Image (spheres, coloured by chain):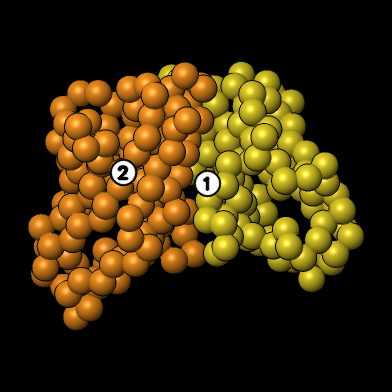
Amino acid sequence: DAGVIQSPRHEVTEMGQEVTLRCKPISGHDYLFWYRQTMMRGLELLIYFNNNVPIDDSGMPEDRFSAKMPNASFSTLKIQPSEPRDSAVYFCASTHLQGHTEAFFGQGTRLTVV
Amino acid sequence: AQSVTQLDSHVSVSEGTPVLLRCNYSSSYSPSLFWYVQHPNKGLQLLLKYTSAATLVKGINGFEAEFKKSETSFHLTKPSAHMSDAAEYFCVVSVGNQGGKLIFGQGTELSVKP
């Protein structure tokens, strides 16, 4: 398996634009997580899914953020409209078996909103 | 509530000397614990994991950690630091009763001097 695949690797966008980040989890994993990493806050869990269903979205900062998982092999994180304070590295991770195994992380998407 | 505290935000050692990165956790349930490493501008890689088997866990690159329930600790150690160990290290607890939700510590930056 190629691991967790995120795209794009880098995104630069203007304030107010819509941004969509994509993630392909490892085949067979039934949990998918979206994290945001900044210098100020470290790694924050935004939302996670189990069997494509959102379980906990309490970490999603605002209504401008939304996430979907239409099927077991694809998830998106959308920011609309984007703001400079959304600039961060966004990681997707997947795992299985209720947390007793490790999560595998993608390489991340570095988002810069100017 | 589950939480994890990394006691040092930055640790500096000389090459060839021992490494100790400290982590304390709080969990109402029997936890699964992990250490991840992140090299600059890279994703997160699993170093080792504890999932209620042996309390002394060996990981990659010569790292190991010991689960001490009485002290609620899971410190990461390595007998002899290498320059390539310079990175950020995250202690992570998995909330088993919440379907694998991962709680990250704030991270410890390890510097290795020649």
Question: B30 above or below B26?
Answer: above
Q: Residue at x 45, y 27 (%)?
A: B95
Q: Nearer the viewer, residue A81 or B39?
A: A81
Residue B96, percent from left and from top: 43, 22
Judge if badges 1 and 2 mark residues of a common chain: no
Q: Which mark is residue A50?
A: none
Q: Nearer the viewer, residue B27 or B20?
A: B27
Disc 2: which residue: B24
* Front position among marks 1 and 2: 2
Chain name for mark 1: A
Q: Nearer the viewer, residue B27 or A73?
A: B27
Disc 1: which residue: A106
Q: Residue at x 77, y 65 (%)?
A: A84
Quick check: B109 left or right of B73? Answer: right
Quarter of the view holding residue B111: bottom left
**Which chain is tinted yellow?**
A
